[in-house]
Image (cartoon, rainbow, N blue to C red):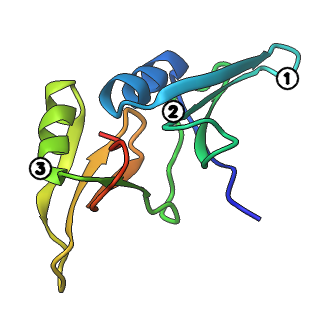
Amino acid sequence: MRILHTMLRVGDLQRSIDFYTQVLDMKLLRTRDNPEYQYTLAFVGYADESEQAVLELTYNYGVSQYDLGNAYGHIALGVPDVAGACDKIRANGGKVTREAGAVKGGSTVIAFVEDPDGYKIELIEADFHERSVL
């Protein structure tokens, strides 16, 4: 077994696609519109769905915002340079909500950013031997 995707409901599909592709450097992998049931899906990620988990962005016709509730935590992305990623995200119009720094009680460097719908995304500094995600 493996995780295939995580689904996020979004209020403006193009705005969310732009954020994940232009700010977080993901690729738009595929879209699917279902007018009969009034929703559109967009799948974004750093690699093909056959290789790793991706995000499913779901737009329900006519719904422009959602109550995120208090159960949602965050999505985590590994990056080689958290401070540099924050600078790039900010330069591309993204919102950094916690600057790069050591996690409380530890030494791992993290930061938090927020997508256009308010979903939290944690950036975790990690040593990568392959192409970085940001």
Mark 3 burial class by Cα count in 10 Å: few <14, some 14-19, many 20+? some
Measured Cα–Cα span from mark 3 to mark 1: 42 Å
Q: Earlier in the sequence, mark 2 or mark 1?
A: 1
At horizontal 31% and vertical 29% (from top left) the residue drawn is: 23
Camera-nearest label, 2 or 3? 3
Q: Amino acid at mark 1?
A: Tyr
Quadrant including the C terminus: top left
At horizontal 48% and vertical 38% (from top left) the residue drawn is: 46
At horizontal 21% and vertical 24% (from top left) the residue drawn is: 92
Label 1: which secondary element: loop
Camera-nearest label, 2 or 1? 1
Label 2: which secondary element: loop
Q: Could you tell me if the residues under marks 2 and 1 are in contact, i.e. CB atoms within 8 Å?
A: no
Q: What residue would you read off at disc 3?
A: 83
Q: Earlier in the sequence, mark 3 or mark 1?
A: 1
Say which mark, if any, is on residue 37.
1
On the question of residue 59 being in view, the answer is yes
Label 3: which secondary element: helix
At horizontal 27% and vertical 61% (from top left) the residue drawn is: 127
Is 124 on the left or on the right of 115, as rendered? Answer: left
Residue 27 screen position, x and y as percent: 49, 26
Q: What residue would you read off at disc 2?
A: 65
Measured Cα–Cα span from mark 2 to mark 3: 30 Å
Q: Amino acid at mark 2?
A: Gln
Q: Amino acid at mark 3?
A: Ala
38 or 45, which lies in front? 45
Q: Could you tell me if the residues under marks 2 and 3 are in contact, i.e. CB atoms within 8 Å?
A: no
Looking at the picture, does residue 75 appear above or below residue 37? below
Looking at the picture, does residue 20 appear above or below residue 18? below
Is 103 on the left or on the right of 24, as rendered? Answer: left
